[in-house]
Image (cartoon, rainbow, N blue to C red):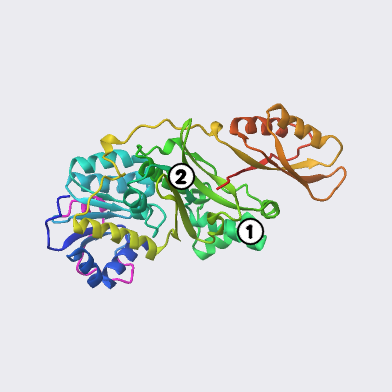
Amino acid sequence: MSDSHKTGPLKIAVAGLGTVGAGVLKLLERQADLIEQRCGRRIEVVAVSARSRGKDRGVDLSTAEWYDDPVALAAHPGVDVVVELIGGSEGPAKETVELALERGRHVVTANKALLAHHGTALAAKAEAAGLAIGFEAAVAGGIPIIKGLREGLAGNRVSEVHGILNGTCNYILTEMRTTGRDFADVLADAQKLGYAEADPSFDIDGVDAAHKLAILTSVAFGTPVDFKSVHVEGIRHVSAVDFDYADALGYRIKLLGIARRTDHGIEQRVHPCMVPKAAPIAAVDGVFNAVIAQGDFVDRVLFVGRGAGEGPTASAVVADLIDIARGRSTPTFGVPAAQLSEAQPSPMEARRGSYYVRLMVVDRPGVIADVAAAMRDQNVSMEQFLQRGRAPGEAVPVVLTTHDTEEAAMQRALATIADKESVVEPPRMIRIEQF
């Protein structure tokens, strides 16, 4: 790395002064002596950019040059590192990072969308110029999962990474379980508390978690970032009644990102899961994130912590800045971009495991036999069957779980069941993961 010999201050420019950007400036100011001790030089903020110049961000900006245009900030003379905290996969964020690399500046970013869509190309550009892209803050906030995988587990072949990658969804699912309230009610509360955005789609539809999973997959398996191959489902369809049945069956419901080597290739999927109550990840509640990695020499390693917010995310940004100040260097995704090995994506239809299915059916003779026949015709074996109460002639919930089967067979069975006149709502399915 080109700055390894330097002892003068590391000069940085910060694009984006929202929650995280302000947090980074506060941390650098408050921990200045500690940071200088740990990296052997001062970190100096010489330029900043944001939408609003007059806003009070709780930190002194008087010594930094102000830019209205973040792209122009990337060309500020004398800057060693551009910190991109704007967000978004295109537009100013992408242009700022690309110009920074062209001008010979290292980059630190919290932008998971940018890396999920353009990470491989940006890594190649950075490495060709001898530059670093630090992105610890892009995945799981304050949890050092990128360093953990890329450096801490560098001697392992990783076979699986899975985790809770979105604190908003984990908060909503935790509240639904503990209070019995429905999804819409809890989401409204999460928005009031600031845990969910005014437009929460990216979070609750699983896209945010999918961005992070695509990045983790690349670091874990040494493959190009392949966001388009991630199967994505959100939590809108999870009902309060599902938590009652999950509890009775010995499970917790979590939105998980799962990346795994299989005989069919590498699978990447984000969707609600039922996990055994005894699984370590089942106990991770509220806004916390957790990631579990499986390595051939370490077995399972669990990382838990706050996955978002001013302090945790700023902590991750500054850790990357300290690495750059020290001249510590590693390829962006663990191996040089040119050596990232293309991997066959495993189709969702090849997923093998057990399933939870909830049906609303008219309570009359023969209905359950029809459901069982649809399962049997696809070689899907039922493990448990639950029906609470009777209401002859009216709709009642029926829940069943299956033995291990292929996703394709399960989907065919559900399509047949959905067409039955006695099934009055679309079947609801949650995959069961036996961690």
Give the labeled residue for mark 2. 210
Question: What amino acid is found at the position of numbered circle 1 in the picture?
Answer: Arg
433 or 200: nearer the viewer: 433
Q: Up-down: is 347 above or below 139?
A: above
Q: Position of residue 222 (x, y in %)?
A: 34, 39
Where disc 1 sits, the SS reads helix
Can residue 50 be seen here? The reply is: no
- Number of numbered discs on residues: 2
Q: Residues within 10 Å of mark 1 (few under 14, many from 20)?
A: many
Q: Position of residue 58 (x, y in %)?
A: 33, 72
10 or 305: nearer the viewer: 305
- Residue numbers of the magenta segment: 54-76
Can residue 321 be seen here? The reply is: yes
Label disc, if present, on residue 415 of the rendered structure:
none
Question: What amino acid is found at the position of numbered circle 2 in the picture?
Answer: Ala
Residue at figure coordinates x 27%, y 38% from the top left: 337
Q: What is the quadrant of residue 211 in the picture?
A: top left
Label disc, if present, on residue 177 of the rendered structure:
1
Q: What is the quadrant of residue 214 in the picture?
A: top left
